[in-house]
Protein backbone atom coordinates (compact mmCIF):
# COMPACT_ATOMS: atom_id res chain seq x y z
CA UNK A 1 0.00 0.00 0.00
CA UNK A 2 2.72 2.41 1.03
CA UNK A 3 4.72 1.36 -1.98
CA UNK A 4 1.83 2.17 -4.20
CA UNK A 5 1.40 5.60 -2.63
CA UNK A 6 5.10 6.15 -3.06
CA UNK A 7 4.90 5.13 -6.70
CA UNK A 8 2.02 7.53 -7.30
CA UNK A 9 3.94 10.28 -5.56
CA UNK A 10 7.01 9.52 -7.68
CA UNK A 11 4.91 9.67 -10.83
CA UNK A 12 3.47 12.98 -9.71
CA UNK A 13 6.93 14.37 -9.10
CA UNK A 14 8.04 13.16 -12.51
CA UNK A 15 5.03 14.87 -14.05
CA UNK A 16 5.91 18.04 -12.16
CA UNK A 17 9.42 18.06 -13.58
CA UNK A 18 8.12 17.34 -17.04
CA UNK A 19 5.81 20.28 -16.62
CA UNK A 20 8.61 22.55 -15.50
CA UNK A 21 11.39 21.60 -17.87
CA UNK A 22 9.90 22.26 -21.26
CA UNK A 23 8.34 25.52 -20.10
CA UNK A 24 9.88 27.51 -22.92
CA UNK A 25 8.73 24.95 -25.48
CA UNK A 26 5.23 24.99 -24.14
CA UNK A 27 5.19 28.75 -24.22
CA UNK A 28 6.65 28.85 -27.69
CA UNK A 29 3.87 26.61 -28.93
CA UNK A 30 1.36 28.81 -27.20
CA UNK A 31 2.80 31.78 -28.96
CA UNK A 32 2.55 30.09 -32.32
CA UNK A 33 -1.13 29.54 -31.87
CA UNK A 34 -2.34 31.95 -29.25
CA UNK A 35 -5.97 31.69 -30.27
CA UNK A 36 -5.95 28.03 -29.27
CA UNK A 37 -4.84 28.71 -25.73
CA UNK A 38 -8.38 28.94 -24.59
CA UNK A 39 -7.79 31.22 -21.67
CA UNK A 40 -8.76 34.75 -20.91
CA UNK A 41 -5.39 35.20 -19.36
CA UNK A 42 -3.75 35.01 -22.74
CA UNK A 43 -2.57 38.35 -23.94
CA UNK A 44 -4.72 39.65 -26.72
CA UNK A 45 -3.45 38.83 -30.14
CA UNK A 46 -3.12 41.43 -32.83
CA UNK A 47 -6.06 40.42 -34.92
CA UNK A 48 -7.91 42.78 -37.19
CA UNK A 49 -10.37 44.93 -35.30
CA UNK A 50 -13.98 44.05 -35.76
CA UNK A 51 -16.42 46.30 -33.99
CA UNK A 52 -18.67 44.96 -31.27
CA UNK A 53 -21.65 45.96 -33.41
CA UNK A 54 -20.37 43.94 -36.38
CA UNK A 55 -19.84 40.94 -34.11
CA UNK A 56 -23.29 41.43 -32.66
CA UNK A 57 -24.75 41.32 -36.16
CA UNK A 58 -23.01 37.96 -36.52
CA UNK A 59 -24.66 36.77 -33.33
CA UNK A 60 -21.57 37.22 -31.12
CA UNK A 61 -21.87 39.33 -27.99
CA UNK A 62 -18.63 40.94 -26.86
CA UNK A 63 -17.36 43.97 -24.95
CA UNK A 64 -19.15 47.01 -26.34
CA UNK A 65 -22.30 45.15 -27.38
CA UNK A 66 -25.60 46.67 -26.26
CA UNK A 67 -29.28 46.04 -26.15
CA UNK A 68 -31.85 43.44 -25.31
CA UNK A 69 -29.70 40.45 -26.18
CA UNK A 70 -27.10 41.68 -23.69
CA UNK A 71 -29.75 42.24 -21.03
CA UNK A 72 -30.94 38.68 -21.54
CA UNK A 73 -27.38 37.37 -21.40
CA UNK A 74 -26.62 39.30 -18.21
CA UNK A 75 -29.81 38.15 -16.54
CA UNK A 76 -29.02 34.51 -17.32
CA UNK A 77 -25.44 34.92 -16.06
CA UNK A 78 -26.78 36.51 -12.92
CA UNK A 79 -29.32 33.74 -12.37
CA UNK A 80 -26.54 31.19 -12.67
CA UNK A 81 -24.41 33.08 -10.15
CA UNK A 82 -21.69 34.35 -12.48
CA UNK A 83 -22.55 38.05 -12.66
CA UNK A 84 -22.44 40.27 -9.61
CA UNK A 85 -22.82 43.58 -11.37
CA UNK A 86 -25.98 45.14 -12.69
CA UNK A 87 -28.11 44.00 -15.59
CA UNK A 88 -28.01 47.10 -17.77
CA UNK A 89 -27.82 45.84 -21.33
CA UNK A 90 -24.22 47.01 -21.73
CA UNK A 91 -21.51 44.39 -22.21
CA UNK A 92 -18.53 45.63 -20.14
CA UNK A 93 -15.56 44.15 -18.32
CA UNK A 94 -17.66 42.56 -15.59
CA UNK A 95 -19.91 40.85 -18.11
CA UNK A 96 -16.86 39.59 -19.94
CA UNK A 97 -15.45 38.11 -16.75
CA UNK A 98 -18.77 36.46 -16.03
CA UNK A 99 -18.83 34.96 -19.54
CA UNK A 100 -15.29 33.67 -19.07
CA UNK A 101 -16.15 32.13 -15.71
CA UNK A 102 -19.19 30.47 -17.27
CA UNK A 103 -17.12 29.21 -20.20
CA UNK A 104 -14.42 27.78 -17.97
CA UNK A 105 -16.86 25.97 -15.73
CA UNK A 106 -18.73 24.61 -18.72
CA UNK A 107 -15.72 23.40 -20.68
CA UNK A 108 -15.96 26.00 -23.44
CA UNK A 109 -13.24 28.11 -25.03
CA UNK A 110 -12.66 30.97 -22.60
CA UNK A 111 -12.60 33.93 -24.96
CA UNK A 112 -15.07 36.12 -23.08
CA UNK A 113 -17.30 36.41 -26.13
CA UNK A 114 -20.76 34.93 -26.18
CA UNK A 115 -20.94 33.26 -29.59
CA UNK A 116 -23.09 30.39 -30.81
CA UNK A 117 -21.53 27.65 -28.62
CA UNK A 118 -21.55 29.72 -25.46
CA UNK A 119 -25.10 30.97 -25.97
CA UNK A 120 -26.39 27.49 -26.78
CA UNK A 121 -24.89 26.12 -23.58
CA UNK A 122 -25.92 29.11 -21.52
CA UNK A 123 -29.60 28.81 -22.37
CA UNK A 124 -29.65 25.01 -22.20
CA UNK A 125 -30.89 23.01 -19.23
CA UNK A 126 -27.46 21.55 -18.55
CA UNK A 127 -25.71 24.92 -18.14
CA UNK A 128 -23.61 24.54 -15.01
CA UNK A 129 -24.20 27.20 -12.39
CA UNK A 130 -21.38 28.88 -10.48
CA UNK A 131 -20.49 27.31 -7.17
CA UNK A 132 -22.14 28.99 -4.21
CA UNK A 133 -20.50 31.45 -1.91
CA UNK A 134 -18.98 28.79 0.26
CA UNK A 135 -15.65 29.63 1.82
CA UNK A 136 -12.81 27.26 2.46
CA UNK A 137 -11.31 26.71 5.89
CA UNK A 138 -7.72 26.74 4.67
CA UNK A 139 -6.43 25.56 8.04
CA UNK A 140 -8.66 22.49 8.25
CA UNK A 141 -7.09 19.06 8.02
CA UNK A 142 -3.87 17.60 9.35
CA UNK A 143 -1.73 18.51 6.37
CA UNK A 144 -1.05 22.07 5.21
CA UNK A 145 -2.89 22.99 2.04
CA UNK A 146 -0.71 23.02 -1.04
CA UNK A 147 -1.03 25.55 -3.84
CA UNK A 148 1.49 25.51 -6.64
CA UNK A 149 1.61 25.09 -10.39
CA UNK A 150 0.15 21.61 -10.22
CA UNK A 151 -2.18 22.17 -7.28
CA UNK A 152 -4.25 25.14 -8.25
CA UNK A 153 -7.39 26.73 -6.89
CA UNK A 154 -10.21 27.96 -9.09
CA UNK A 155 -11.53 31.46 -9.44
CA UNK A 156 -14.32 30.82 -6.93
CA UNK A 157 -11.91 29.88 -4.18
CA UNK A 158 -12.28 32.10 -1.11
CA UNK A 159 -10.65 31.45 2.25
CA UNK A 160 -12.79 31.70 5.36
CA UNK A 161 -12.12 34.17 8.16
CA UNK A 162 -10.24 36.85 6.28
CA UNK A 163 -9.35 39.99 8.20
CA UNK A 164 -7.65 43.22 7.27
CA UNK A 165 -4.03 43.17 8.38
CA UNK A 166 -4.24 46.75 9.49
CA UNK A 167 -7.05 45.95 11.93
CA UNK A 168 -5.04 43.25 13.70
CA UNK A 169 -1.49 44.52 13.43
CA UNK A 170 -2.05 48.19 14.15
CA UNK A 171 0.30 50.74 12.66
CA UNK A 172 3.30 50.58 14.99
CA UNK A 173 4.64 47.08 14.39
CA UNK A 174 4.73 47.09 10.64
CA UNK A 175 3.86 49.19 7.65
CA UNK A 176 1.08 47.50 5.73
CA UNK A 177 1.62 48.95 2.34
CA UNK A 178 -1.92 48.62 0.99
CA UNK A 179 -4.65 49.40 3.43
CA UNK A 180 -6.99 46.68 2.23
CA UNK A 181 -4.50 43.81 2.38
CA UNK A 182 -6.12 40.82 4.05
CA UNK A 183 -5.11 37.49 5.50
CA UNK A 184 -6.66 34.59 7.40
CA UNK A 185 -7.11 35.63 11.02
CA UNK A 186 -4.99 32.88 12.61
CA UNK A 187 -2.10 33.65 10.29
CA UNK A 188 -2.37 37.40 10.85
CA UNK A 189 -2.36 36.88 14.60
CA UNK A 190 0.76 34.73 14.25
CA UNK A 191 2.29 37.51 12.19
CA UNK A 192 1.60 39.91 15.02
CA UNK A 193 3.24 37.62 17.59
CA UNK A 194 6.24 37.22 15.29
CA UNK A 195 6.67 40.95 14.75
CA UNK A 196 6.38 41.59 18.48
CA UNK A 197 9.17 39.06 19.04
CA UNK A 198 11.32 40.73 16.39
CA UNK A 199 10.76 44.03 18.15
CA UNK A 200 11.80 42.48 21.48
CA UNK A 201 14.96 41.31 19.73
CA UNK A 202 15.75 44.88 18.71
CA UNK A 203 14.38 44.65 15.18
CA UNK A 204 11.22 46.64 15.69
CA UNK A 205 11.52 49.06 12.82
CA UNK A 206 11.17 49.14 9.06
CA UNK A 207 9.15 45.99 8.54
CA UNK A 208 6.79 46.25 5.63
CA UNK A 209 4.15 43.91 4.28
CA UNK A 210 3.50 44.37 0.61
CA UNK A 211 1.17 41.47 -0.11
CA UNK A 212 -1.24 39.09 1.56
CA UNK A 213 -4.42 37.50 0.28
CA UNK A 214 -4.98 37.88 -3.43
CA UNK A 215 -8.09 37.16 -5.43
CA UNK A 216 -8.08 35.48 -8.83
CA UNK A 217 -8.93 38.78 -10.48
CA UNK A 218 -6.08 40.54 -8.73
CA UNK A 219 -3.67 37.91 -9.99
CA UNK A 220 -5.04 38.38 -13.51
CA UNK A 221 -4.55 42.13 -13.18
CA UNK A 222 -0.99 41.70 -11.93
CA UNK A 223 -0.13 39.47 -14.83
CA UNK A 224 -1.64 41.95 -17.25
CA UNK A 225 0.12 44.90 -15.65
CA UNK A 226 3.42 43.09 -15.87
CA UNK A 227 2.75 42.12 -19.49
CA UNK A 228 1.87 45.70 -20.26
CA UNK A 229 5.05 46.98 -18.60
CA UNK A 230 7.16 44.64 -20.71
CA UNK A 231 5.46 45.80 -23.87
CA UNK A 232 6.07 49.41 -22.97
CA UNK A 233 9.70 48.79 -22.16
CA UNK A 234 10.43 46.74 -25.24
CA UNK A 235 9.06 48.36 -28.34
CA UNK A 236 8.23 45.82 -30.99
CA UNK A 237 7.50 42.95 -28.61
CA UNK A 238 4.32 41.11 -29.39
CA UNK A 239 1.73 40.71 -26.64
CA UNK A 240 2.44 37.01 -26.40
CA UNK A 241 6.17 37.60 -26.01
CA UNK A 242 5.55 40.17 -23.29
CA UNK A 243 3.22 37.77 -21.55
CA UNK A 244 5.80 34.99 -21.67
CA UNK A 245 8.29 37.32 -20.03
CA UNK A 246 5.71 38.38 -17.43
CA UNK A 247 5.04 34.76 -16.53
CA UNK A 248 8.60 34.43 -15.34
CA UNK A 249 7.85 36.59 -12.37
CA UNK A 250 4.08 36.52 -11.95
CA UNK A 251 2.25 33.28 -11.25
CA UNK A 252 -0.72 32.19 -13.32
CA UNK A 253 -4.01 32.91 -11.58
CA UNK A 254 -4.87 29.89 -9.44
CA UNK A 255 -1.29 28.87 -8.81
CA UNK A 256 -0.27 31.67 -6.47
CA UNK A 257 -0.04 30.76 -2.82
CA UNK A 258 -1.38 34.21 -2.01
CA UNK A 259 -4.87 32.93 -2.91
CA UNK A 260 -4.86 31.03 0.41
CA UNK A 261 -4.66 34.11 2.62
CA UNK A 262 -1.84 32.37 4.50
CA UNK A 263 1.09 33.86 2.59
CA UNK A 264 2.61 37.29 3.07
CA UNK A 265 5.40 39.21 1.45
CA UNK A 266 7.34 40.84 4.22
CA UNK A 267 10.44 42.91 3.64
CA UNK A 268 12.36 45.88 4.90
CA UNK A 269 11.23 49.32 3.85
CA UNK A 270 13.58 50.86 1.36
CA UNK A 271 15.63 47.72 0.88
CA UNK A 272 16.27 46.51 -2.63
CA UNK A 273 18.07 43.38 -1.50
CA UNK A 274 16.05 41.95 1.34
CA UNK A 275 18.11 38.74 1.50
CA UNK A 276 21.10 40.74 2.67
CA UNK A 277 19.35 42.44 5.60
CA UNK A 278 19.24 41.67 9.32
CA UNK A 279 15.48 41.50 8.97
CA UNK A 280 15.81 38.65 6.51
CA UNK A 281 18.29 36.81 8.74
CA UNK A 282 15.97 37.16 11.72
CA UNK A 283 12.99 35.97 9.69
CA UNK A 284 14.90 32.96 8.46
CA UNK A 285 15.94 32.02 11.95
CA UNK A 286 12.72 32.63 13.84
CA UNK A 287 9.67 32.61 11.60
CA UNK A 288 8.98 28.91 12.17
CA UNK A 289 8.55 29.58 15.89
CA UNK A 290 5.38 31.43 14.93
CA UNK A 291 4.22 28.84 12.40
CA UNK A 292 5.72 30.34 9.23
CA UNK A 293 8.06 28.90 6.65
CA UNK A 294 10.18 30.69 4.07
CA UNK A 295 8.28 29.02 1.31
CA UNK A 296 10.61 29.36 -1.69
CA UNK A 297 14.24 28.58 -0.95
CA UNK A 298 17.06 28.69 -3.42
CA UNK A 299 18.02 25.05 -3.04
CA UNK A 300 14.42 23.90 -3.51
CA UNK A 301 13.69 25.79 -6.69
CA UNK A 302 13.43 22.65 -8.80
CA UNK A 303 10.88 21.16 -6.45
CA UNK A 304 8.76 24.20 -5.72
CA UNK A 305 8.91 25.43 -9.31
CA UNK A 306 9.41 28.97 -8.08
CA UNK A 307 12.57 30.99 -7.78
CA UNK A 308 13.85 31.82 -4.30
CA UNK A 309 11.87 34.47 -2.44
CA UNK A 310 13.31 35.21 0.99
CA UNK A 311 10.44 37.63 1.67
CA UNK A 312 7.55 35.26 1.04
CA UNK A 313 6.38 33.54 4.21
CA UNK A 314 3.61 31.00 4.48
CA UNK A 315 1.70 30.11 7.62
CA UNK A 316 1.46 26.35 8.25
CA UNK A 317 1.32 26.24 12.06
CA UNK A 318 4.17 25.74 14.50
CA UNK A 319 4.28 21.94 14.45
CA UNK A 320 4.61 21.67 10.67
CA UNK A 321 6.93 24.67 10.40
CA UNK A 322 9.22 23.28 13.08
CA UNK A 323 9.46 19.91 11.36
CA UNK A 324 10.22 21.43 7.98
CA UNK A 325 12.83 23.72 9.47
CA UNK A 326 14.55 20.93 11.42
CA UNK A 327 14.62 18.56 8.46
CA UNK A 328 15.22 21.18 5.79
CA UNK A 329 12.16 20.26 3.77
CA UNK A 330 10.07 22.42 1.52
CA UNK A 331 6.31 22.05 1.67
CA UNK A 332 6.14 19.73 -1.34
CA UNK A 333 8.71 17.37 0.23
CA UNK A 334 7.00 17.50 3.58
CA UNK A 335 3.57 16.68 2.20
CA UNK A 336 5.00 13.90 0.08
CA UNK A 337 6.70 12.47 3.17
CA UNK A 338 3.42 12.48 5.05
CA UNK A 339 1.61 10.86 2.16
CA UNK A 340 4.13 8.09 1.69
CA UNK A 341 4.38 7.47 5.43
CA UNK A 342 8.00 8.46 5.99
CA UNK A 343 6.85 11.41 8.05
CA UNK A 344 4.38 10.83 10.86
CA UNK A 345 2.88 14.00 12.18
CA UNK A 346 1.91 14.33 15.79
CA UNK A 347 5.28 13.44 17.30
CA UNK A 348 5.60 9.92 15.89
CA UNK A 349 8.78 8.40 14.55
CA UNK A 350 9.96 10.03 11.42
CA UNK A 351 12.62 9.07 8.98
CA UNK A 352 12.80 12.15 6.88
CA UNK A 353 14.94 11.94 3.80
CA UNK A 354 18.43 13.25 4.41
CA UNK A 355 18.92 16.59 2.81
CA UNK A 356 22.05 18.15 1.55
CA UNK A 357 22.55 21.87 1.90
CA UNK A 358 21.73 24.19 4.69
CA UNK A 359 18.83 26.57 4.94
CA UNK A 360 20.57 28.69 7.52
CA UNK A 361 22.66 30.20 4.82
CA UNK A 362 20.39 32.35 2.80
CA UNK A 363 22.46 33.04 -0.24
CA UNK A 364 19.62 33.80 -2.58
CA UNK A 365 19.88 37.06 -4.36
CA UNK A 366 16.90 38.87 -5.62
CA UNK A 367 16.65 37.52 -9.11
CA UNK A 368 16.63 39.82 -12.07
CA UNK A 369 13.46 38.92 -13.85
CA UNK A 370 14.98 39.03 -17.30
CA UNK A 371 17.06 36.02 -16.32
CA UNK A 372 14.69 34.26 -14.01
CA UNK A 373 14.18 30.76 -15.32
CA UNK A 374 10.84 30.10 -13.74
CA UNK A 375 7.78 31.64 -12.26
CA UNK A 376 7.67 32.97 -8.78
CA UNK A 377 4.67 32.89 -6.57
CA UNK A 378 4.60 36.61 -6.62
CA UNK A 379 4.22 39.63 -8.67
CA UNK A 380 6.98 42.07 -9.07
CA UNK A 381 8.60 41.72 -5.68
CA UNK A 382 11.38 39.64 -7.07
CA UNK A 383 12.26 42.10 -9.79
CA UNK A 384 14.08 44.24 -7.27
CA UNK A 385 11.37 46.86 -7.54
CA UNK A 386 8.87 45.44 -5.12
CA UNK A 387 6.43 48.25 -5.34
CA UNK A 388 5.80 49.51 -8.77
CA UNK A 389 3.46 46.79 -9.91
CA UNK A 390 1.52 46.41 -6.75
CA UNK A 391 -0.62 49.48 -6.79
CA UNK A 392 -4.04 49.05 -5.30
CA UNK A 393 -5.83 46.84 -7.68
CA UNK A 394 -9.15 47.88 -9.08
CA UNK A 395 -12.30 46.77 -7.34
CA UNK A 396 -14.50 44.40 -9.19
CA UNK A 397 -16.81 46.51 -11.25
CA UNK A 398 -18.73 46.24 -14.42
CA UNK A 399 -17.32 49.56 -15.55
CA UNK A 400 -13.77 48.37 -15.29
CA UNK A 401 -11.98 47.93 -18.58
CA UNK A 402 -11.66 44.25 -19.39
CA UNK A 403 -8.41 42.62 -18.51
CA UNK A 404 -7.49 41.85 -22.05
CA UNK A 405 -7.27 45.53 -22.82
CA UNK A 406 -4.32 45.97 -20.46
CA UNK A 407 -1.75 44.56 -22.81
ZN1 LIG B 1 4.62 36.27 -2.11
Image: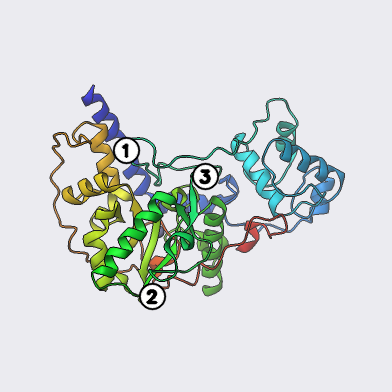
Q: Dots 3 and 2: beta carbons under 8 Å?
A: no
Instruction: Please name whichever residue, 400 or 313, is drawn nearer the observer in this view of the structure.
Output: 313
Name the secondary structure under disc 1. loop
52 left or right of 367 in image: right
Instruction: Please name whichever residue, 396 or 151, is drawn nearer the observer in this view of the structure.
Output: 396
Q: How far from the left and from the top, in percent, is residue 298? A: 26, 59
Which residue carries the number 2 mark?
Answer: 269
Instruction: Please name whichever residue, 143 or 363, is drawn nearer the observer in this view of the structure.
Output: 143
Above or below — where is 291 with respect to 134? below
Above or below — where is 302 with respect to 157? below
Tell which circle, 1 or 2, labels the residue nearer the N-terminal end. 1
Which residue is outermost to the bottom? 270
Q: Is residue 109 visible?
A: no
195 left or right of 95 in image: left
Could you tell me which residue is drawn at 18 percent across and 37 percent down? 347
Q: How far from the left and from the top, in percent, is residue 68? A: 87, 44
Above or below — where is 52 with respect to 142? below
Which residue carries the number 1 mark?
Answer: 143
Report how far apart the C-alphas of labels 3 and 1 lie in the structure.
Answer: 19 Å
Report how far apart the C-alphas of labels 3 and 2 lie in the structure.
Answer: 30 Å
Q: Please rate how many residues cluster around mark 3, counting C-alpha atoms within 10 Å: few if below 14, some from 14 to 19, many from 20.
A: many
Q: Please rate how many residues cluster around mark 1, counting C-alpha atoms within 10 Å: few if below 14, some from 14 to 19, many from 20.
A: some
Q: How far from the left and from the top, in percent, is residue 344? A: 20, 34
Quadrant the C terminus occupies: bottom right
Q: Which mark is residue 158?
A: 3
Name the secondary structure under disc 3. loop
Quadrant the N terminus occupies: top left
Instruction: Tell me the quadrant of ligand 1.
Output: bottom left
Q: How far from the left and from the top, in percent, is residue 254? A: 48, 47
Report how far apart the C-alphas of labels 1 and 2 lie in the structure.
Answer: 34 Å
Amino acid sequence: MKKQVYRIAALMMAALFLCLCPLENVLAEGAAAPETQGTENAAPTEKPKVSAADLQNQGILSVGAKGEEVTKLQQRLKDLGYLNGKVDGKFGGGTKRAVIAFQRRNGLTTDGEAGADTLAKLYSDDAKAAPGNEKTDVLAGDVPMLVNKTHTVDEFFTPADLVKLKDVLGTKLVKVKYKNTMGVRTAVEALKAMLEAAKADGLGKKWQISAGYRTWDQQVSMLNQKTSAYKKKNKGWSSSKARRAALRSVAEPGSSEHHLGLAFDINKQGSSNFAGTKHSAWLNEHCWEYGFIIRYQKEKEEITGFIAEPWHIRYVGVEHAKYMKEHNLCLEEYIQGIENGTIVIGGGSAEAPAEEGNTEEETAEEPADSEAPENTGDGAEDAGTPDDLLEDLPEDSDEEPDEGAAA
